Amino acid sequence: MANYTYLTQSGYDKLRNELEELKTAGRAEAARAIAEARSQGDLSENAEYDAAKDAQGMLEMKISELETVLSNARVLDESQLDDSKVAILSNVTIKNLKTGKELTYKLVSETEADTKQMKISVSSPIGAGLLGKERGDVAKISTPGGVLEFKIVEISIG
């Protein structure tokens, strides 16, 4: 079974642009650093050369990871999604039943998660606990701090 990564169009474009940047400017910078270190003389005792080669290896690993993610990516059309149940790309307003505080999160893939923008991964404890729930349902979610209960107040797409 393929391990798909579901992305929004903007998330896909962001990853594709990052990959292109790494392949062009990133590789050019790595080659420059290796050439500069090589000009320092004896390679057997050249820490700068070793560090530049290690950095190049890390760059190539990141490029490979991004290529894998993009090759397994499926871009979701938000206009085709159902807002009756919580799913990836849902905007979910939840109410903490203990504190009464309401928060709205967007459920996204791991690669698009950003808590500052209120985007949480569907594989996070809260994200996974909300999946499949409907308006009015109570989700009991185990967290490191204990079990939290959230009521699903609203579900929307977009």
Image (cartoon, rainbow, N blue to C red):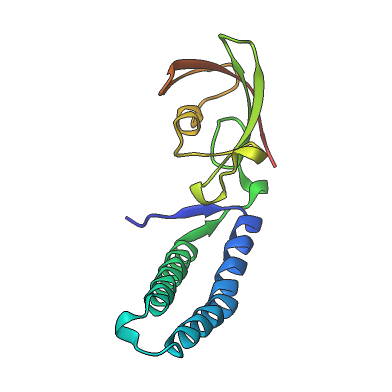
Q: In which quarter of the image is residue 43?
A: bottom left
Q: Which residue is drawn at 43% across and 64% down?
A: 65
Name, please, the residue furthest toward the right. 158
From this view, report whether residue 112 is shown above or below residue 136: below
Name, please, the residue furthest toward the left. 44
Q: Which residue is drawn at 38% across and 75% down?
A: 47
x and y, in percent, of residue 141 in the image: 44, 21
Q: Which residue is drawn at 42% across and 69% down?
A: 64
Left or right? Give the position of 42 relative to 157: left
Q: In which quarter of the image is residue 120?
A: top right
| Of 54 and 48, the residue lying toward us | 48
Q: How many marks?
A: 0
From this view, report whether residue 113 is shown above or below residue 30: above
x and y, in percent, of residue 110 in the image: 49, 47
| Of 6 and 39, the residue lying toward us | 39
Residue 63 visible in this rendered orientation of the protein = yes
| Of 56 and 157, the residue lying toward us | 56
From this view, report whether residue 96 is shown above or below residue 71: above
Q: In which quarter of the image is the N terminus?
A: bottom left
Residue 82 visible in this rendered orientation of the protein = no
x and y, in percent, of residue 19 in the image: 55, 70
Q: Which residue is drawn at 46% across and 36% down?
A: 124
x and y, in percent, of residue 46 in the image: 37, 80
Q: In which quarter of the image is the C terminus?
A: top right
